[in-house]
Amino acid sequence: MSNASATNQSVESKVPARFGQLIGTGAKSDLLIGFGIAAALMIVAAIAELIFGVRAEQRSLESVATPLTAIQQETGASST
């Protein structure tokens, strides 16, 4: 597992609990700030997808990315 994936899973597991705490405080302004931060992160993710994303609609996975088995065959690497 890559560090980015591990970090992503760590953050994903904590966010619902944090929103629960914000709701529990009863302070609407805190909840508004939380939703604002979440919205900003989603906008950043959308921009990253526009920059780094791959147009893959109506295409097979093999035409989007070379399968790992083909790379292993080219390099002679073992799958074990």
Image (cartoon, helix red, strand yellow):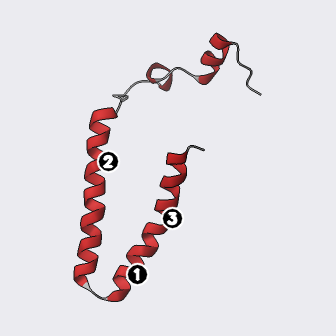
Name the one closer to the observer, 6 or 39.
6
**Distance of label 2 from label 3 (alpha carbons):** 18 Å
Which quadrant of the view contains residue 31? Answer: bottom left
**Image position of 72 (left or right of 22):** right
Q: Quadrant of the C terminus?
A: top right
Which residue of the protein is positioned furthest toward the right in this rendering? 80
Numbered disc 1: secondary structure: helix
Q: Quadrant of the N terminus?
A: top right
**Crowdedness of circle 3 by 10 Å Cα count: few (<14), some, many (20+)?**
few
Which residue of the protein is positioned furthest toward the front in this rendering? 3
**Crowdedness of circle 1 by 10 Å Cα count: few (<14), some, many (20+)?**
few
Image point (64%, 20%), residue name: 69
Dot 2 or dot 3: first in sequence order is 3
Image point (48%, 26%), residue name: 61
Image point (41%, 24%), residue name: 59
**Distance of label 3 from label 1 (alpha carbons):** 14 Å
**Image position of 44 (left or right of 20):** left
Give the number of marks: 3
Give me the disc on residue 13: 3
Give the percent coordinates (x, y) of residue 51.
Answer: 28, 34
**Image position of 9 (left or right of 50):** right
Which quadrant of the view contains residue 23? Answer: bottom left
Dot 3 or dot 1: first in sequence order is 3
Give me the disc on residue 21: 1
Give the percent coordinates (x, y) of residue 7.
Answer: 50, 54
Which residue corresponds to mark 2? Answer: 45
Q: What amino acid type should be assigned to the residue bearing mark 3? A: Ser
**Crowdedness of circle 2 by 10 Å Cα count: few (<14), some, many (20+)?**
few
**Image position of 72 (left or right of 57):** right
Q: What amino acid type should be assigned to the residue bearing mark 2? A: Ala
Numbered disc 3: secondary structure: helix
